[in-house]
Image (cartoon, rainbow, N blue to C red):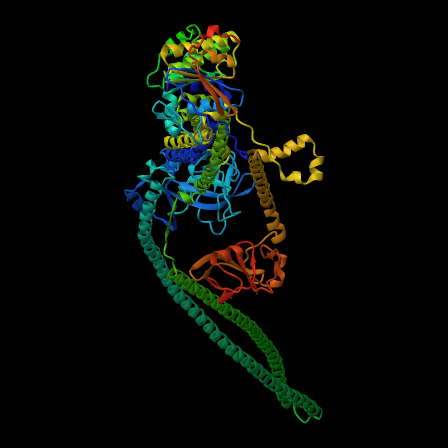
Amino acid sequence: MGEQLIKAADGVSFTIEQGEFCVMVGPSGAGKTTVLNMLGGMDTCDSGLIRLGDCQVSQLNERQLTDYRRHEVGFVFQFYNLVQNLTALENVELASEICRDPLDPKEVLEMVGLADRMHNFPAQLSGGEQQRVAIARALAKNPKILLCDEPTGALDYETGKNVLQLLQDSCRQTGKTVIVITHNQALTQMADRVIHLRNGRVAKMECNANPLPVERIEW
Amino acid sequence: MSRAYFKSILRSVRESLARFLAIFAIVALGVGFLAGLWSTTPDMHLSLDSYYDQQQMADVFIKATHGLTEDDIAALAGLPSVAHLLPAKVVDTLVATTDNRRLTARLYGLPWAQLSGDQPLPVNRWQLVAGRLPQTPQECLVEQGDSYLESLELGSTLSIVTEADNADLFATTQFTVVGVVANPFYFANEREPSNVGKGRLEAVIYIADSCYDLDLYTDAYLTNSQAAQLMTFSAAYEEQLEDFVAELEQLGEERSRLRYAQIHGEGQAELDQARADLAAAEQEAAQELASAWQDILDARQELSEAREELDRGRADLAAARTALAQEKAQAEAQLAQTEQELMQARQELEQGEQSLAAALEAGLIGPEQAAVWRQELDQGWEQYRTGVAALEGAKTALAQEMAAAEARLAQAARQLEQGERDYDEGRRQLASGEADYWQARAEVEQELEQARLDLEDAARQLDELEMPSWYVLDRNANVSYASFTMNTEKVQAIATVFPVFFMLVAALVSLASMTRMIEEERTQIGIMKALGYGRWAIMEKYMGYCGLASLAGSIVGLLVGFRYIPVVIWQVFATMYPLPTLYTPFRWPFAIVATLGAVLLTLLVTIYACNRALQEKPAMLMRPRPPKAGKRILLEKIKPLWSRLSFSHKATARNLFRYKKHFYMTVLGVAGCTALLVTGFGLQDSIGSLGHTQFSELMHYDLSIDCSVLGFTAFYGERATAHRGESDAPVTVFVPHTPADWPQFITLRERPSGDSLDLATYPVVISETLARALGLKAGDQFSLEDSEVRGQLCLYPSVSLSGCLWAGG
């Protein structure tokens, strides 16, 4: 079907410091998800360089990418993407069991406030709870970097706030690098760093000296 | 594999139970059929083997051309390799039933102890199906009936139809059926050939061997000491039997030489005796003939003497007649003279009277004188009267004498007549005696000549006495066994082809199921990938899923297949082979191979199905699968047609080419099914029409008669060997008496053109089979061996149907 070459991301160059809470913002089709996927080793780039610490992500082969995804990255998806036939705890375990240095799944679930719901199947959980399970799943892997693709996109205002709070807390408390994709400009206020994408390019990158806590953001 | 992951697999199974069951079921079906069909033949073999073992089925049976003597049997029994031995007198003959039907029967004469059940049968143990065992030699057992053998009723009477060639074979010819048995030798419902009657057996009858008036056994049934523990169909058994048969054949040769010597010796002795008898008879006959001839000669002598005597008698009679007549004439002359004299004396006396009377008158004489005269006269008268009286007396005497003589002569004549008659009678008797003699002589000579010829014949036969031989036959010569073997081989053939289809179907179903499953779980695979699960780890799930399904399916398939498929097939054969038990053991090698095959196949299929999804980037997997791009198709270029199509038709037309895989699968599937259908119908059609073509279009005759009357046969037929180069082939040769008439009976056609061939145009026509066997083309030459047809046969451009060779003229 490739009659016409479509460049999803081109000329995207940015750097994020370790431990930063970064928000990537842009309209639909700006290439946010593509960039995030490439960062997380879920997709590959045809040219260019992606580096995570010492790791040249863009140079990794299939097998190394698998390891990279396994050990370095935690993903949170817009539609949670839990395994439907596993309970909340098992979903977390599914991720933690293959990692080098995982957190205890139960503790992580308690941390995200799901101590009571950990034996429920995704279908028995609300959207926010599911997204929290997804975050717990990502956190339990104890990754260096947490990549979140529209984590609040499918959630209502309040729940979305809770989820964002959770992400911000985990960034602040565990010192993980968190990158959140959103099309919601309001969220830029809570970020240490904001990257604006437009038409597959970085339009603007700005650093927030004083990011706001989530509860103070309104949209 | 992580714990949570394993759980997810188990839950997948539960959630998509229908899919799991589909794979499970199709694998169960495939493996079940595979294992079941594979094991059917071994199971059938095993069952027959155990039946044979139970019934002590003979491994080998021997048929001797000149019978088996007690010594032969003893020699056989003496072999260490012979475990059990049953000698029997077996003859095929016609028997008449109570309702006067004639059946072609095989009569087994068996030792009484075994027949009556006092001792168990050493081999071919039968089972009594109905009735009881015989208690007197007038009772018999019969083999249970099937499609070929008659079901004879208990209590019915069978009598042997005696003919010239078996008249002195049986001591008892009438039997009452008291029991019905099932002999392993005849377990199959199959046609048993026979050389009498209709050519197939209609009854097998077991009688006491004492009912035979025969010192020899015709058959011997043997078991090998090592063979019982071997499977009857196994290579080991075959090998064992090969050795055994070779050993028996060697013994057979030795025994046959002895038998030859014995028969030849007996024959020679008989011949010598017969020669001596003939010589004695010849001598006796010569003597008797000589004495008879002597008698005839004597009789001739007597007759000729009698003739002479008769002639003499005739002459004597004639002489006597003449003498008598003379005598009579003489005597009559004498009498006449005496009468004359008397007449004269009377005249003289009358003159003397007159003279006296005159003298007295004249007185010339005195009285005295007269007295003297008177006295003289009286004296004269006296004399005269005496003379007359004497004459009369003489006359009477003569008459008497003559009459007596006449009577005597008449008597003699009569005697002579009688003699004459006796003589004639004698002659007649002699003539008939001579005729008798010649006739008797001819007869005797003819008889002697016949005896001489017979003797020569016997001598020639003795010279031509064939070396006796033993036919040592293994189970393959047993019709039941051969039929069973053939059918199990058929099953085997099916077993090699059929399951492949099932496995193929299983693979396809697995492929479809797994492809769909992976399609459905695309996102989940993406999640797994995103979480950092490797290819194999992800594949493990699907392999585990499919593997579990196919393993479980295999196990169930094996359990069911091993147990029931052979049973089902067995039931099909049950009408043909009413054997007691089918053994269906669990066969580990088959089980392992079938399971491994099924599991590996489904796993491979799974890997194939997974591979495409796994090659995609996780990011792609996370997104819903992009639909296939629509394409323009060729049909659109035909504007008038395309513009007339409705939208749904346009969509359908495009989809045909959009989803090429579906399209090809559909085309292939339909093509395959159609091919199968057409093949099936085609087979049915060609097999169905085969009979019609053969017997309506090609063979027009209803009956062929083997007849030794020369000139009656329409063709000369023989079996021979066609030879060309290195190749040989057995052929039947037909040489029609009048080739022009041949097409009335059999049409010869060229294949595949179907053109009729005329023997007048093509003097030698051979069958396609023969042509292929010898690599012959039209115009090639080949020769016939063991044939009365001489010379090289040159082939004309013609090839025809059926396994024969026709030669014109």
Percent x, y of residue B644: 72, 35
Q: Nearer the viewer, residue B268 or B289?
A: B268
Work out whether residue B410 or residue B492 is closer to the camera in this orientation and state it. Answer: B492
Question: In the rendered image, which quarter contains the N terminus of chain B?
Answer: top left
Q: Nearer the viewer, residue B526 or A188?
A: A188
Which of the image's four quarters has the C terminus of chain B?
bottom right
Query: Left or right: where does residue B609 sit relative to residue B283?
Result: right
Q: Nearer the viewer, residue B158 or B690?
A: B690
Q: How many marks?
A: 0
Classify residue A107 as left or right of residue B806. left
Residue at image x 35%, y 57%? B264
Q: Position of residue A97 (x, y in %)?
A: 36, 17
Q: Do we see residue B173 in this rendering?
A: yes
Residue B95, image x and y in percent? 51, 43
The part of the image, by quadrant, that contains residue A107 is top left
* Residue B556 seen in render: no
Q: Is residue A197 above or below residue B295?
A: above
Query: Which of the 4 image quadrants contains residue B671?
Result: top right
Q: Give the x, y percent position of residue B244.
A: 32, 45
- Residue at the spot 28% in from the left edge and 44% down from the top edge: B79
> On the picture, is B238 further left or further right than B328?
left
Residue B796 vs residue B267: left or right? right
Q: Residue at x 62, y 34 (%)?
A: B654
Is B785 placed above or below B384 here? above
* Residue occupying the point 50% across, 25% down: A200
